[in-house]
Amino acid sequence: MDRSGGANIEENVPTVPGSYALLLELKEPVRLAVGRLGEFLFPRGDYLYLGSAHGPGGLRARLRHHAWPVEHPHWHLDWLRPWAALPGGWYATGTDLLECAWSQALLCLPGICIPAPGFGSADCRRKCPAHLIAFPGGVNVDLVEEVLRRVPGTPLIGRFLRA
């Protein structure tokens, strides 16, 4: 179990609404039951989870929640988080729900796969196959950031990475 928290979330992420992309790393494969979604095998490797934060405390509150494993899982990511390191991620402020557009743009990259259909997209209005994407060959953080920035409507993106 990996209990690694996020990098500088408290200082660097604003308390406003926005969308986020969390970089996750599984050091070992893990088979998990993800709430009502079902059981999945998550291979060792890099993942990106896409979400939005529009409730109280905005991005900072949501990312703080995801930074540490929780005792009572609420979101799909809460089931995976105890097993995955969180080396960092990106966020964009604003009220637009960008996670669907980001997911669709990233799924166009070669070699990307969906390890758990429906993961993170249970309430998705655009019928995304998932908001958790796997990078079997390893993630190129510069390429991910470039893809996120190119999505129409994406404001300047903040980045937080573990030192």
Image: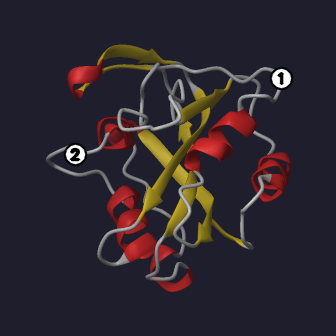
Q: Please tell me which residue is depicted at 72% across the width and 62% down the height of the picture.
A: 153
User: In the displayed structure, does residue 15 sit left or right of residue 163?
Assistant: left
Indicate which disc residue 93 carries. Answer: none
The quadrant the C terminus occupies is: bottom right
In-front residue for pair 27/109:
109
Residue 127 located left or right of residue 21: left
Quarter-wise, where is residue 94 in the image? Answer: bottom right
Residue 115 in the image: above or below residue 70: above
Give the residue displayed 43% in from the left and 34% down from the top.
121
Q: Amino acid at mark 1?
A: Pro
Percent coordinates x, y for residue 108 in the rendering: 79, 28
Residue on which disc 2 sits: 74
The answer to whether residue 135 of the structure is visible from this angle is yes
Secondary element at image label 2: loop
Whether pointer 2 and pointer 1 mark residues with C-beta atoms closer than 8 Å, the reply is no
Looking at the rendering, which quadrant does residue 2 occupy?
top left
Measuring from the top left, give residue 143's x and y in whole percent.
85, 47
x and y, in percent, of residue 54 in the image: 39, 67
Q: Work out whether 26 lies above or below 100.
A: above
Asked whether 34 or 29 is in front, the reply is: 34
Give the residue at x 53% y 76%: 8
Please give left or right for residue 137 compared with residue 34 in the image: right
| Distance from the alpha carbon under mark 2 to that under mark 1 | 31 Å
Within 10 Å of the Cα at label 1, are there few (<14), some (14-19), or many (20+) other Cα atoms? Answer: few
Q: Residue furthest front?
A: 125
- Pointer 2 local density, CA inside 10 Å: few below 14, some 14–19, many at least 20: few
Towards the viewer: 97 or 28: 97
Residue under numbered circle 1 = 110
Q: Amino acid at mark 2?
A: His
- Residue 112 horizontal/vertical position (percent): 72, 24
- Say what secondary structure mark 1 lies in: loop
